[in-house]
Image (cartoon, rainbow, N blue to C red):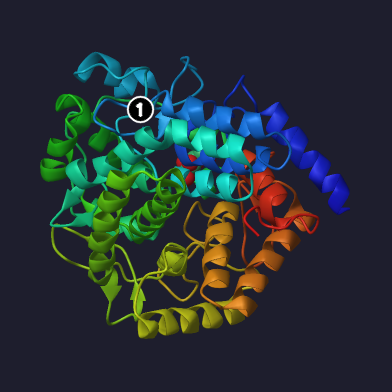
Amino acid sequence: MSELLDTQAMEILQKNDRGGYTVPTARLYPYQWNWDSAFVALGFGTFDRERAWTELELLLEGQWQNGMVPSILFRHDDPDYFPGPSVWQTQSMHTPQPPMPSTGVSQPPILACVMRQLVDSGDNTDLQHASQLFEQTFNWHKWYQTQRSVNGVVCTVHPWETGRDNCPDWELGLDSMAVDSELEPYQRMDIKHANPEQRPSKEQYDKFISIVKFGREQQWNQRVLTDDGPFLMADPGIHFILLRANKDLLAIARRLKLTDAIAELETMIDAGERATDYFWNESLGAFTARNIKTGEFSNGLSNASVLCFFAGSGSKQQQQLTIEHLQRIQRQVRFLMPSWDPAADMFDAQRYWCGPVWPQMNYLVSMGLEEQGYDVLAKAIRGDMTALIRQSGFYECFNPVTGDGCLGTDFSWTAAIWLAWASPNRQRLAA
Ligand code: GLC
């Protein structure tokens, strides 16, 4: 059965390949998505190294001059997707003009982590590829410092920038903003291609589009978007991923003997470690999202909270308390790791980021736990991922209680994570 699934996974990646870049799934997501592409490269990396690097090179083709790598690259205009290039208008609004139509926000910077996996499991050719992409990747990391940080804490201006688009974490920031009173009427496409019950509500969507309107009106000036935008939160997901990505980039810089970059990255990592405490929610005993404008903490633990292990950050005590949450949640659901705490308000086993298990998150969480010596939980999370895919197939995400697949089918990152990690026939690439 595993061999059959291995073959299917490869076929999914090939089927979703649009000539050097891969769409997450046909119809629902018809463009190149930032962190999806990085995970996809891990999958290709198990059977076609050159194709893996091409995916990453094409992602960086969309990088803005200020360093930002957008969340979606619109290489063509697909009328079946909303909000597409005519809504974002980044090319006509922003100076200097971005290299291609794209969104005006980013997504979790997992790229450097993937590059390191490919380098560590590869040969000199992989190192050469990494060397070619090094500076661009480094510039993206610096963009977080110069354009997306407030008092040393990296933040986010749009739930879509976190990759955890509809997590209850964002309610805090969304509640404190209003829908733009001049919002033009629009037609959603997501609810045409996916079950509306599993997608965001109309009010949430109006707010998502209001933030886009603000960005457009500010010509996508990223500093203005951060300082004066309607939404500003700190996301443990982006924080921990960026911290880990800086560490992975440092490892690559050492291999390449880039003395200046090594020193600069060490400073960035120190600053990142200092910011970790900002996310510590004392009353919950976990790292959670926070509304930067008010300092208020989100009241639930998410799968991003447990990325502290992946970042190798937080005190022993903070990590121990996080482990206890994981053990409790393991008793509450059949499959780890739900995207939202089943004990928290708004848990919904089938709704987008309010409960479902996400393959790419399980991969990161498990890798972190393994590295920090929590082998039993690391194995349980991997085992659950294997079981979910065996039970339901290559869905976008899965119900943690029943194991049913949710939302998109034949999903690229699920296929990639299977190949690189969840398939019993593979060891993790870096193993
Ligand atoms: C959804 C997810 C996001 C992902 C995108 C494409 O918007 O929330 O994380 O990148 O789909 O798969």
Q: Is residue 182 left or right of residue 382?
A: left
Where is residue 417 drawn, in percent x and y? 65, 49
Quadrant in the rendering for residue 146: top left
Q: Is residue 67 left or right of residue 118?
A: left
Q: Amino acid at mark 1?
A: Gln
Q: Is residue 279 left or right of residue 82?
A: left
Quadrant in the rendering for residue 304: bottom left
Q: Residue at x 34, y 40 (%)?
A: 138
Between 413 and 313, which is closer to the camera in this rendering? 313
Between 192 and 405, which is closer to the camera in this rendering? 405
From this view, report whether residue 258 is shown above or below residue 23: below
Around disc 1, counting alpha carbons within 10 Å, would you say few (fewer than 14), some (14 to 19), or many (20 or more)? many
Where is residue 375 drawn, in percent x and y? 62, 77
Residue that label 1 marks: 63
Between 262 and 282, which is closer to the camera in this rendering? 262
Where disc 1 sits, the SS reads: loop
Asked whether residue 23 appears in the rendered view, the answer is no
Asked whether residue 310 appears in the rendered view, the answer is yes
The number of numbered badges drawn on the structure is 1
From this view, report whether residue 270 is shown above or below residue 126: below
Where is residue 246 drawn, in percent x and y? 36, 52
Mark 1 close to ligand 1, CB under 8 Å: no
Q: Is residue 27 left or right of residue 61?
A: right
Where is residue 86 drawn, in percent x and y? 34, 17
Between 179 and 56, which is closer to the camera in this rendering? 56
